[in-house]
Image (cartoon, coloured by chain):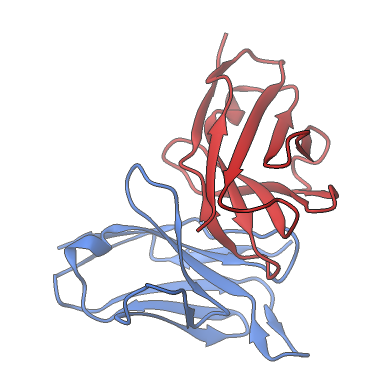
Chain colours: A red, B blue
Amino acid sequence: QVQLQESGPGLVKPSETLSLTCTVSSASIDSYYWSWIRQPPGKGLEWIGYVNYLGTPHYNPSLNSRVSISLGTSRNQFSLRLSSVTAADTAMYYCAFMNNLGVVTFWGQGALVIVSS
Amino acid sequence: DIVMTQSPDSLAVSLGERATINCKSSQSVLYSSNNKNYIAWYQQKPGQPPKLLIYWASTRESGVPDRISGSGSGTDFTLTISSLQAEDVAVYYCQEYYTTSYTFGQGTKLEIK
């Protein structure tokens, strides 16, 4: 059972950079794919991207120019950075484990990030 | 990009009755080399993250009750709950993993009538 926990600021100002970290337990990030998925309040799910165990990222094309996902310096963490945020980026941000099929099998509890001045 | 469209947007079913949720992809998600449909279904209860129910369109994840099943091929897929229980109240999402966009449907809210 892979466990994931998001952490980071819950409030970000417009035009600034959103940064979140996911801490993984009961698994090593030396395998598979480590993802970020978001959900605006009352809306559906949007896949943001993943970083694989080699550190190679892959992003949703709609966010590609603003997003960066990377493995952490700690062997059990990975992170998300989203630049130039606007109110439209207000959402619950989930980190998740994606298996080699591309199926998301474990999710964190989510971190609510509000973009507001 | 693949567009995933679910129907209906919301559904109210009586306890013990059948619930059917549909998902249509804008292009086939059947991979000919292995004859598998790259569709997953997730259940999201209020205040919780989504939970994987089904992958390969019809393979139940471990621990998922057998009253929940998936079917379909190509572009048209269905999630069926054969006998609705109170704990099945949730929003259900389909997702394609045929492309590396991993697109979700917009969700279907299932309630008790």
Q: Position of residue A45 (x, y in %)?
A: 54, 49
**Does B53 sit above or below residue A75?**
below
The residue lying at 35 percent from left, 42 percent from top is B47
Q: Is residue A115 left or right of residue A43?
A: right
Q: Is residue A19 left or right of residue B22?
A: right
Q: Position of residue A34 (x, y in %)?
A: 68, 50
Q: Position of residue B9 (x, y in %)?
A: 39, 59
The residue lying at 75 percent from left, 40 percent from top is A63
Q: Quadrant of the C terminus of chain A?
A: top right
Q: Position of residue B21 (x, y in %)?
A: 39, 72
**Does A36 sit above or below residue B16?**
above
Q: Is residue A84 left or right of residue B25?
A: right
**Does A87 sit above or below residue B45?**
above
User: Within the image, what quadrant is residue A62 found in?
Assistant: top right
User: Within the image, what quadrant is residue A94 found in?
Assistant: top right
Q: Nearer the viewer, residue A25 or B21?
A: A25
